[in-house]
Image (cartoon, rainbow, N blue to C red):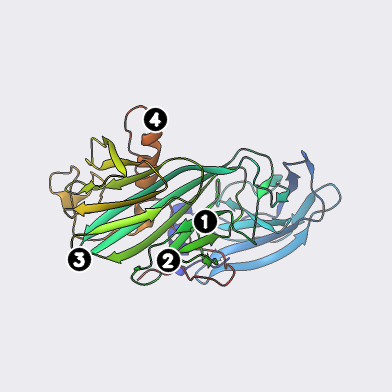
Amino acid sequence: MRISPRAVLLAGLLLAPTFAAAAVSGTVMNKTTSRPQADAVVSLYRLGEKGMEPVKTVKSDAQGAFRIDEEVQGPHIVQTIYDGVVYTKMIPPGTPSENLELDVYAATSKKGKTAVSQHMVLIEPMGGILHIDESIIVNNPGNSTYNDSKNGVVRVYLPPEIDGDPRLTATSPQSMPVQRDLLKTKTEGVFAIDFPVKPGDTRFDLSYVLPETDPPVFSGKVLHGGGALRLVVPRGVTLTGDDIEQVGEEPRTHAKVYDVKGTEYSVTVEGSGTLQAPDNPASGDGGAGIQAIRPRIYSRAALIIGLALLILLAGFLLLYRRPLPLPGADAPAGHRGKRK
């Protein structure tokens, strides 16, 4: 896993003050079998200015126990590799680093009941381009990790007129966001996501830009059979089209939410603006508004998640927090996820 110096700095600030940590020890538990897991690879990393710095790697014994007799100052993490999947546990400074329980799961390429539970597309027209942020939440209700490197765990459609390369981040349950690549498929415009889906909810955030047409039109396809797709636009922006229906408006930001009726859609975008939290000083009065500066998707990930959850609940409740952006793991060669 690679972590940017900026992310390390943010992690250090979040976890400060720092203290010297004692030896790291514990047990690797296989949650699929409910038994201790032998021969799991356990690695200790310190988070420094150069990113993740390896300290030591060991294997769990026949009883699943492991011990790393190294003292590490500052924030550090423990990674466990089992069945080809990496599991990460953060150890904040000052917290016990002994008698840990590291959970792993058996991996399977069978999808089972794993499915997309929520899919939302945020459309922000500004400065002659369309900023698109997609959030896809995949739920795994089982006790095994779904991992299909050959076909990908979920497929997405990207419009051919994308300006530059898309950016993809994946966030496992109780873990850190990591950057991944989109993999090309044999079908034009269809890309696969190769990332293990652990039990619980895994979120994929996809961000890209499109040149505006006259009039501005955005089209897409739904390639999964899971939860319904919703389109979201900020205050001052309206969508029109035969394939959508407005289902609500978030009361604090006045973001409009539309339900997509079928598996393909094409909408005309009217107006311009960007979504922002109501406490942003750029709005002047402290309320929701439109700002002229494009924030990164990381700073609004919770905002996007909140809107997606609101759609499924009775009423609207927007969640605001700024998750720590820790770009991460190397992925197989494919469609590189880098946004201009």
The first of marks 2 and 1 along the sequence is: 2
- Name the front one of labels 3 and 1: 1
Q: Which numbered disc covers residue 155? A: 1
Q: Residue at x 29, y 53 (%)?
A: 123
For numbered disc 2, what is the local secondary structure? helix
Residue 106: x %, y % from top left: 73, 48
Q: Quadrant of residue 33?
A: top right
Say which amino acid is labelled 4.
Answer: Leu
Q: Which mark is residue 6?
A: 2
Q: Which mark is residue 313?
A: 4
Q: Is residue 333 left or right of residue 101?
A: left
Camera-side mark, 2 or 4? 4
Inter-mark Cα distance, 3 to 1: 28 Å
Say which of marks 2 and 3 sits in front. Answer: 3
Q: Is residue 143 above or below residue 61?
A: above
Q: Secondary structure at mark 1?
A: strand
Q: Which residue is mark 3?
A: 128
- Which of 6 and 314 lies nearest the eye of the viewer? 314
Disc 2 from disc 1: Cα separation: 30 Å
Judged by depth in the image, the label closer to the viewer, 1 or 4, is 1
Residue type at mark 1?
Arg
Distance between the alpha carbons at the discs numbered 3 and 4: 34 Å
The mark that comes first in sequence, 2 or 3, is 2
- What residue is shown at x 56% (from left), y 43% (from top)? 115
